[in-house]
Amino acid sequence: MIKIYHILALISALSSTIGNIYAKRSVKEGANSIQIALFSNVFVPVLFIPALIINRSTFNWSEVLYPIIMGVALYLGMILSFIALRYGDVSIQTPILGSKVIFVTLFTVLLGLESLKFTTLIAALLTFIAIFMIGYTKSEGAKKKALLSVLLGLASVILFVITDLVIQERSYLFGKMSFVFIGTVITSTLLLITAYVMKSGFNSVKKKTRKWLALTAVFNCAQSALIAYALSFFGHATEFNIIQATRGFWVVLIVWVFGGFFGVNEGGLGRLVMIKRMVGALIMLASVLLVMLF
């Protein structure tokens, strides 16, 4: 039976997909990685304030180092993920982000937080097969760009894994909603400082680019809000994350069929490339299902 949090998760997945497509269009219109990250995240802490009030969250300042670590890791992950979008295709980067669940599981095994299951091993192998399929291109120059995008994407995923593990292992000591709020404030502050130092703030954005950055921000912030409120009010994180992982499939489909509408022409790479990326995205989703359901 379909629940309301299933619908919220699907909307979140689609919102994330469209946000990344608009981020790629922003790059095409002259935006840099700092500007995209800044627009996508600077308003996120505001979205958590109502949840803080509703949950009457408190702050345990003796544990403040950990939300700071979370904020720094999230900041670095965001920067790398948008650099990956700059150098590669959105139909590569978004499915790669789906591997986060797999790497979280592998890291928890390596850190001794849980034991290795056979399904986890199979999921890891499927993930690497999926990455190979997603990174497939025909021309030599495109192969180098795809490899760089995959490597940057994987580096961002590792940083997002660190973010998730710090939240998982330490947030209850600080106060869960308070922890995420402080972490996102740290991320936003670092982005503002970086934008100021590199002269990539709001005023430096070209007029023709502002519309695309604004659309990127709307969809990415909507995704963050949906995740925060759906998990706060309904829970069911496993089911939510499984549906959220479908964004790897949706992005390949949308770029292939509707890329022209968004001004992103990755569908022009050819039918074989897009079919292999679609297969890779589906394999990635299968590996996520293995980890989260078994």
Image (tube, helix red, strand yellow):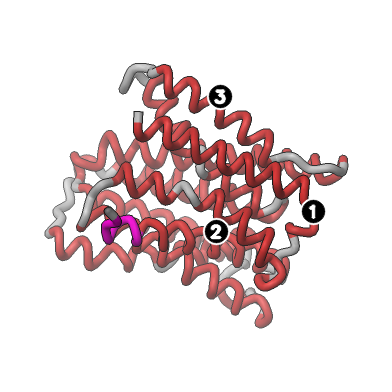
In the rendered image, residue 62, in percent from the top left (x then y), is placed at 20, 41
N-terminal of the pair, mark 2 or mark 1, is: 2
Q: Is residue 118 visible?
A: yes
Task: Find the magenta span and give its range.
Answer: 2-8
Name the spot of residue 289 as percent of width and height, x first: 42, 36
**Majority SS type along the magenta span:** helix
Residue identified by numbered label 3: 125
Q: Nearer the viewer, residue 200 or 3?
A: 3
The spot of residue 29 in percent (x, y) is: 71, 71
- Secondary-structure class at tag 1: helix
Please tell me how crowded label 2 is: few (under 14), some (14-19), or many (20+) other residues with Cα within 10 Å: some
> Mark 1 belongs to which amino acid?
Leu
Q: Give whichever of 174, 26 is nearer the camera.
A: 26
Sequence order check, earlier mark of 3 and 1: 3
| Residue hosting label 1 | 269
Residue most extreme to the bottom: 207
Q: Is residue 181 visible?
A: no
Q: Residue at x 56, y 50 (%)?
A: 249
